[in-house]
Image (spheres, coloured by chain):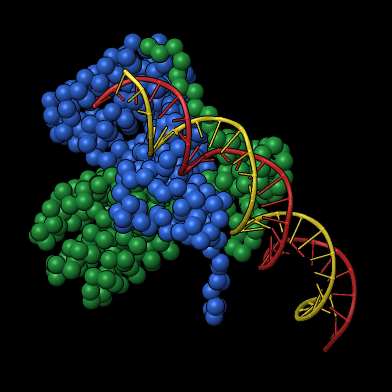
Chain colours: A blue, B green, C red, D yellow
DNA sequence: GGGCATATATTGTCGGACAATCAGACTATC
DNA sequence: GATAGTCTGATTGTCCGACAATATATGCCC
C-alpha cells in the first residue's frame, strides 16, 4: 500500500467556511443570531473580504445562514426543508434513479407516514387532506391533478408530525411528479382510482385507525405500479427532474 | 391582494450559479465535462471574476462541480451521496429531531432495505455483511461497536441496490451513531442482542428470504427502542450530531 | 413615544495584481 | 524508448483598493 496519503492544501475559503460552520453546529452561534459583517470576519480570520465572501456563499447554499427578505445582514438559520430536499432529488435524478427504485421507497415511507398521521393528525390537517381529495376528484386533467396528488402525500407526511419522514418523503414527491403526469395522461381511469384510494386513506386517518391507514396507503402505492405498467412505462424508466 | 409582489433583485452571483446549474441539470453540460476557466466564464457572463467565483462556490457545495484531487480545473460531477446526506442529517439535527422520530423512520426504511437486499445482494456484499456481524460480535466496547453497527445498516442498504433507499438511510445512520453509543455504554447486554439479531438478518439475506429479512430487521429495530428505554433515554431525546 | 431626515455601515460588484502551481511541450539522459 | 529534468503558459487562490446602492442606526422634531 501507499506510504503517504496525498496531503491536500485546503483553500482558505473552505477553512473559513468550516470554522463558521463548526460554531453554528455546536451552537456557539444560534439560529437567529446575526453574523458579524464581512469586513469584521475578514479581519478576525486574517483574510481578505473576497475570501470570506466565498466562504459565506458556501454556508448560504447549505442553508446555514440566510437573510430576511430585502435585508443585508446575514443571520444564522436552520436549513429550510425544501432547500435540502431539492438538493436530494436533484442528486437522485442525476444518478439515474429508476421508477422502480422510487416506487420501492414510496412503499417503505408512505404507509409509515399514513400510520403516524392517523395517530397524530390535527383537525386542521384533516381538513386540508379532505380538501385535496375533493380537488383531485374534481380535477379534469393531469396538469391540475398531479400537483394535488403530490400535495396529498406531502400533507399526510406532515400530519405524521415526524420531521424525518417529512424530509425523507419530500424528495420522492419531486421525483414522482413528472413521471406521474406521464401516467395520468395515458390512463384516463387513473384519477378515479386515485380518488377512491385517497378517500379510504383519509377516512382511516380521520378515524385514527393507524393500521388501516397504512394498509390503504400501501394498496394505493401498489396501484401506482400497476398503473405504470398499464400505461406502458417500464420500471427501469429513469425519472426526470421537474421544474 | 397586492398588485405587485416585492421584486427582489437577485444578485449576479446567484444568477450566474443558476444559469450554470440549469445547463448541468438539462444535460447540456454532462458529468465529466470540464468547465471553462473562470476568466472565460466571467467574460461570457459579462461579470467580474470574483462574481463568477462566488457562483462556483455555490455549485461546488451543491456537489454539481468538483475537481479531481490535486487538480485545478473544475469538472461537472454527480453529487456524491455522502455530501448530500451529511447536509440532510445536519438539517435534521438542527431542527431538533427526537429519537422517536428517528426510530420511526428506521422502522419504515431498514426493513424495506433488508427485504430488497435479500432479493438482490451479491456474494461480495454478503461477505462484507458477515464480516461486520463477526466484528460486532468480537467487539469489546461501544467505541468500536457503534461504527460497525452503523456500517451493517449501510451495507444492507447498499445491498438493496436501491439508490433512493441508500440515500434515505444514510442520514439516519449519521444521527443514530452518537445516540447509539450512549445506549451501548449503559447497557452491557446490548451488544449480544444486536449480534444475535444481525445473525438472523444476515442468514435471511443469504437465503434470499425477503420476508424473513424484513421481519427480523423490524424486530431488530424494535429491540433498539426497548434498549433505549432500558437505558433510560427518553424518546423525546433530541439526537445530537456526531463527527 | 412615534415619525422623519440624515449619517454610517455594509453589501454587491468591479478592476487590477501577484505568487503558486498545474498542464503540456520540449529536451537531456540512461 | 522510457524516464527525468526544464521551460512556458494558463489558471487558480488570494489580496488590495474602490464605488454605487441601500439597509441600518442616529439624531431631531413633534
Q: Which of the 4 image quarters holds residue A200?
A: top left
Q: Is residue B24 left or right of residue B229?
A: right
Total residue callouts: 0
Q: Is residue B178 left or right of residue A150?
A: left
Q: Residue at x 46, y 54 (%)?
A: A41
Residue A101 visible: no
Where residue B78 appears, as percent x and y from the top left, is 54, 48
Q: Residue at x 18, y 30 (%)?
A: A121
| Most foreground residue, B123 or A148 | A148
| Most foreground residue, B228 or B60 | B60
Residue B123 visible: yes
Where residue A240 appears, as percent x and y from the top left, is 51, 34
Q: Residue at x 11, y 56 (%)?
A: B229
| Most foreground residue, C12 or B94 | C12
Give the vertical position of C11 relative to A26 (above or below): above
Where residue B65 appears, as percent x and y from the top left, is 58, 49
Where residue C26 appears, as percent x and y from the top left, is 89, 68
Q: Is residue A122 left or right of residue D28?
A: left
Q: Is residue B21 left or right of residue B193?
A: right
Q: Residue at x 12, y 25 (%)?
A: A207
Q: Which of the 4 image quarters holds residue A147?
A: top left
Amino acid at each position: 500500500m501507499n506510504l503517504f496519503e496525498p496531503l491536500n492544501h485546503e483553500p482558505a475559503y473552505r477553512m473559513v467556511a468550516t470554522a463558521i460552520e463548526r460554531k453554528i453546529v455546536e451552537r456557539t452561534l444560534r439560529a437567529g443570531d446575526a453574523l458579524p459583517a464581512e469586513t469584521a470576519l475578514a479581519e478576525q480570520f486574517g483574510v481578505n473580504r473576497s475570501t470570506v465572501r466565498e466562504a459565506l456563499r458556501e454556508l448560504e447554499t447549505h442553508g446555514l445562514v440566510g437573510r430576511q427578505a430585502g435585508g443585508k445582514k446575514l443571520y444564522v438559520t436552520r436549513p429550510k426543508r425544501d432547500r435540502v430536499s431539492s438538493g436530494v432529488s436533484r442528486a437522485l435524478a442525476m444518478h439515474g434513479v429508476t421508477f422502480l427504485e422510487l416506487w420501492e421507497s414510496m412503499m417503505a415511507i408512505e404507509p409509515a407516514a399514513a400510520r403516524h398521521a392517523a395517530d397524530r393528525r390535527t383537525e386542521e390537517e384533516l381538513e386540508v387532506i379532505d380538501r385535496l381529495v375533493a380537488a383531485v376528484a374534481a380535477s379534469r386533467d393531469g396538469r391540475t391533478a398531479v400537483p394535488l396528488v403530490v400535495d396529498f402525500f406531502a400533507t399526510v407526511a406532515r400530519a405524521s408530525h415526524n420531521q424525518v419522514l417529512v424530509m425523507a418523503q419530500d424528495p420522492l414527491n419531486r421525483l414522482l411528479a413528472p413521471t406521474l403526469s406521464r401516467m395520468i395522461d395515458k390512463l384516463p381511469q387513473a384519477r378515479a382510482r386515485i380518488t377512491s384510494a385517497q378517500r379510504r386513506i383519509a377516512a382511516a386517518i380521520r378515524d385514527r385507525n393507524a393500521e388501516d391507514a397504512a394498509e390503504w396507503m400501501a394498496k394505493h402505492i401498489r396501484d401506482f405500479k400497476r398503473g405504470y405498467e398499464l400505461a406502458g412505462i417500464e420500471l427501469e424508466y429513469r425519472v426526470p427532474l421537474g421544474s
